[in-house]
Amino acid sequence: MSGGLGRIGVVTFPGSLDDRDARRAIRAAGGEAVALWHRDRELHGVDAVVLPGGFSYGDYLRCGAIARFSPIMESVLTGARTGMPVLGICNGFQVLCESHLLPGALTRNDHLHFVCRDQRLRIENAETSWTTDYTAGQEITVPVKNIDGGYVADERTLDALEAEGRVVARYLDWNPNGSRRDIAGITNQTGNVVGLMPHAEHAVDALTGPTTDGLGVFTSALRTLVGSS
Amino acid sequence: MNERSEHTPMPSLDTVKHAEQTPDTELPWAELGLKEPEYARIREILGRRPTGAELAMYSVMWSEHCSYKSSKIHLKQFGTKAPDSDALLVGIGEQAGVVDIGQGYAVTFKVESHNHPSYVEPYQGAATGVGGIVRDIIAMGARPVAVLDPLRFGAADHPDTRRVLPGVVAGIGGYGNCLGLPNIGGEVVFDPCYQGNPLVNALCVGVMRHEDIHLAQASGVGNKVVLYGARTGGDGIGGASLLASETFDSADGKPSKRPAVQVGDPFQEKLLIECTLEAFQERLVVGIQDLGAAGLSCATSELASGGSGGMRVELDSVPLRDSSLSPEEILMSESQERMCAVLEPDKVDRFLEICEKWEVTATVIGEVTDGDRLTVHWRGEQIVDVPPRTVAHDGPVLDRPYARPAWQDALQADDPAKLSRPGTGEELRAAVLALVGSPNQASKSWITDQYDRYVLGDTVLAQPEDSGMIRIDEETGLGVALATDGNGRYAKLDPYTGAQLALSEAYRNVATSGATPLAVTDCLNFGSPEDPAAMWQFAEACRGLADACQVLGTPVTGGNVSLYNQTGEKAVHPTPVVGVLGVIDDVTRRTPMAFGQEGQLLYLLGDTREELGGSAWSEVAHGQLGGLPPAVDLERERLLGEILVAASRDGMIDAAHDVSDGGLVQAVVESCLRGRNGARLVVPDGIDPFVFLFSESQGRAVVAVPRSEEVRFTDMCGARGLPAARIGVVDGQEVELQGQFSLPLDELRETYERTVPALLN
């Protein structure tokens, strides 16, 4: 990394909403947040990338389906394939699935409503670039807010995700969107790319979030960057 | 969307010249909603018959919705009686008022109705209501930071409520969530009077620096007028004149007016917000106006009359979704997500560049001219030549007859004192459960969980808290709080008092959270102004609200009037909805409603009298509405507010909840459930337990005081003359009224939470 603070970029697509919040969370974790624009081809030297929540391109066609073709995504894909930490939150998770960096897809919530609530989760894999500051089995509470948050994949893929320990987090108490096997987040085979439906960036300050449990996602990435520099 | 039939014949062009040459041509003024004297007045202003396009403009701008013709003379009081306030930077009259909150920040906020469209098409009606109020706020130069939605529906168990409510809620969520604005409060009320006429009000609040206030004005000869945002289509044509007035049945065999409801595109609006704010930041804009009701007719006439007066518009330049639209239709279209900016010529290129960055269509459609005429041109011909002020501001003003209805005395004489009441502990227990599980008092989380309350990361409090609170400055902790309230039952019993009670409650809610109330916005939902009884209710409510604002020192900065809220002869309850804005210097000092700490002492602030008229208890237990509403005591509200703000600032209380509909017991149950702690209550001497639990006396709040602060807190109340009665302690997992009953929290929670989902799922 480029010395000093870890630099984490946050991409703004047309219709991104939680981009400011992701940048604030990165700063709260002690990193430097860099705003990235979807039309740029450059990553401006960042060490990691967050694809934030929102409704990129109004969720038209399919969630994430248009954003995936943004010019910046080529660089994100290249980075992700060479080990750069990439996190997709909510709509960002949808973009990662559309980009085939992660398997499966996110579909309309089974109850057909938007849902915004404080959600208890269990961290299943504490070894990805974005979860090393947690322990496996740790229970945390962060907000979930989505209308297309139901994680689906075919049984073979789901079995493989389980067998390879690639389920990063699971919903506890109540499955808010009908996700298969209560999956709230998954990772790729190398653990540097993570998709998370719940909004960790909204649980970094007890004044404005239910807890500070989400901060660990961002401190994990910064620690990963230090470790690899 | 809303493509017209391709067989619609193009009307031949009615130019200004043609109108002069054919003075006797009959125009469909009555079909466009104009009355005969209004049409005569238009002819008098122009000195000839209007062209078709001019008639279109006048008809929408002189509609009740745009011209406030029935309400104007009553609304004047909000100006003439306005209290002196240093806080007001822009007063009533602009699209939304602007309030100084200190540290160089200003806040603008406004509530509006979208009642009629939401009944016709719940999803789009409610969605475009959010879109419209958000554009109003941007047009003042502010970044929108939150929305609130006061909603009223028919009976909770009526089949049509199951059609209207989920659509409205999904529309508000679908639009607001996609814009990235947290939804932090509002209300949901059920009453059979709203069955054929739900009330869908939307409030938006925005923030700016003092120097960034923008007004709707087109000044500077040669400046360019740019239309940007969505293309113009055939949706919502005549919406303002058709929907927001009279009736929308198609019982007379005429085609349904469904297409008059506009269709929203929140993604487009999100882009519109971002590119407008970027243009503001670079100081490119001289004047700005959103396109809402009456579309281009409204925007061009208001911009021109707000500025030096002259404007020339080339209608051919307007980007269209449907190339077959006639010029009249283009002028009247209410296609959503459009705005108009006025720019100096050398700023136009940069403005268009910003629009291109956000992929927003932007087109120069005209320019500011010297003189005082608004002219519109189409295919090289002049089709409009009017003094813009006559369109925008000189609409008809009616002094409609009003009279106290004959039934008012009988209604007020129907005193709830005669109703049978619970006496034993067992009966009181059952009455509490019935209240807590009633649709109006039960948890609304089925609804509010469909709204994003977290986005933007500055939400400090959101529903079901007393007020929604947003942090404005991350460094200093400066924030604002907002609450909306209205009680149609109270206002039906006495509209003057009812309006004051709506203000009292919203004021109290803001203070309960620890913020100092500063200013007011109102949405006045009433029946037909042509009915003297409804007009009397309206006049009384305006008078009551203006009088109360004067006493509380909170000026009305803007708002909205919605009339004709009735199906056939049956009007809704008179429903003034009042939004109060407050400021808090440091949001970390906020007071939440949850009883979070066992052992803390519960104090009831204020006086409890037997006041059950219009109460939740009389509705739930007896289905009764009669008597007089609770008495208003504005000086007490102000004192209570000051105590609550001081206690919050100095850390004397840990929780507070206002006592309003449902009485003390409803407040205690809500705070217990939210804090996951029970409470042991004792009835103070001299009060009947039933009155203690269910009375709706005003000027009251229940607070949780840490034992270490008890003396300091009670000394302060004593010194200021505010009654404070110790009524119990936060303890255990039950709500217990000593010697009467106890209710486990689990049972209360189950009762509180199951009602609304059971009705709607």
Image: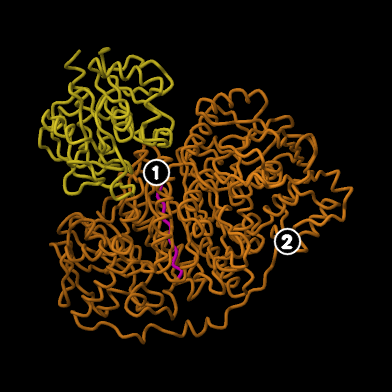
Chain colours: A yellow, B orange
Percent of width and height locating residue B343:
64, 30
What amino acid is at disc 1? Answer: Asn
Q: Is residue B365 above or below residue B680?
A: above
Q: Nearer the viewer, residue B614 or B684?
A: B614
Percent of width and height locating residue B119:
49, 60
Marked residue chain, label 1: B
Question: Which residue: 24% across, 15% down?
Answer: A82
- Dot 2: element: loop
Question: Which residue: 66% across, 28% down?
Answer: B344
Q: Is residue A39 magenta?
A: no
Q: How many marks?
A: 2
| Foreground tag (1 vs 2) | 2
Q: Is residue B419 above or below residue A48?
A: below
Q: Is residue B413 above or below residue B486?
A: below
Precedes in sequence: disc 1 or disc 2: 2
The quadrant the C terminus of chain B occupies is bottom left
Q: Nearer the viewer, residue A204 or B269?
A: B269
What amino acid is at disc 2? Answer: Ala
Percent of width and height locating residue B196:
49, 67
Left or right of A214: which side holds B101?
Answer: right
Q: Which residue is labeled 2 in the image?
A: B30
- Dot 1: element: helix
Is residue B475 visible to the viewer in this orientation of the structure?
A: no
Near mark 1 (Cα within 10 A), the count class, few <14, some 14-19 or many ≥20, is: many
Q: Which residue is labeled 1 in the image?
A: B177
Q: State which region is magenta.
A: B480-488
